[in-house]
C-alpha cells in the first residue's frame, strides 16, 4: 500500500476520534492497535481504523490532516459515515 495516507481512528463507534497521516498505513495502525505509540491513542484506547484516504504526495496528506483536525466532531462523524456507515474496523481490509 504505497503512497501517503490520511486516516481516522476511533475508540468505538461514535467514540473518541484521532486523525493522523502516515506513509505506511498498515504499520502505523498496527502500532496504534498494539499500544506501541505513546500518547493520545494509547491513553484513550483509540485503535479502530474507521476511515482512510490515499494521496500521491505527502504535502496533500499533511494538509488534509490539518484541515480535518480543525473540523467539528459532527463533520468528522459525517465523513466517517459516508465511507463506513457501520463503523467497521477497516484494519483487516488493509492487511489483505
Image (spheres, grey):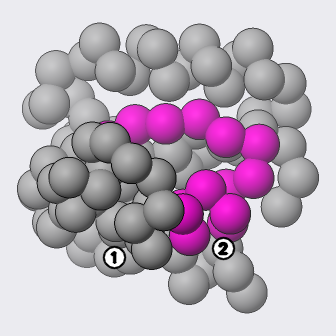
* Residue in the picture at 29% in, 56% down: 42
User: For residue 89: magenta?
Assistant: no
Residue designated by label 2: 94
Q: Is residue 10 left or right of residue 25?
A: left
The x and y percentages for residue 84 are 36, 63
Report x, y in % for residue 52.
54, 50
Residue where numbered disc 1 is placed: 88
Q: Would you say residue 85 is visible in this rendering?
A: no
Whole-percent x, y for residue 79 in the image: 33, 40
Which one is earlier in the sequence, the residue at label 2 or at label 1? 1
Residue 72, quarter of the rendered image: top left
- Crowd rating for badge 1 (residues with CA inside 10 Å; few <14, some 14–19, many 20+): some
Q: Is residue 69 above or below residue 80?
A: above
Instruction: Write the start and end of the magenta stretch as one range.
Output: 18-31
- Residue 22, given in percent of the width and then of the height, sits at 67, 40
The residue located at (69%, 80%) in the rendering is: 95
Q: CA–CA distance between discs 2 and 1?
A: 12 Å
Dot 1: what SS? loop
Q: Helix or strand or loop: what does disc 2 sit on? A: helix
Q: Is residue 95 left or right of residue 76?
A: right
Quadrant into which the N terminus falls: bottom right
Q: Is residue 25 left or right of residue 2?
A: left
Amino acid at each position: 500500500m504505497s503512497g501517503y495516507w490520511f486516516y481516522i481512528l476511533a475508540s468505538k463507534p461514535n467514540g473518541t476520534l484521532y486523525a493522523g497521516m502516515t506513509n505506511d498505513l498498515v504499520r502505523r495502525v498496527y502500532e496504534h492497535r498494539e499500544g506501541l505509540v505513546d500518547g493520545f491513542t494509547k491513553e484513550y484506547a483509540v485503535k479502530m481504523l474507521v476511515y482512510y484516504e490515499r494521496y500521491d504526495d505527502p504535502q496533500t496528506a499533511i494538509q488534509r490532516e490539518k484541515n480535518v483536525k480543525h473540523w467539528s466532531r459532527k463533520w468528522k462523524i459525517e465523513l466517517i459515515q459516508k465511507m463506513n456507515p457501520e463503523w467497521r474496523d477497516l484494519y483487516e481490509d488493509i492487511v489483505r
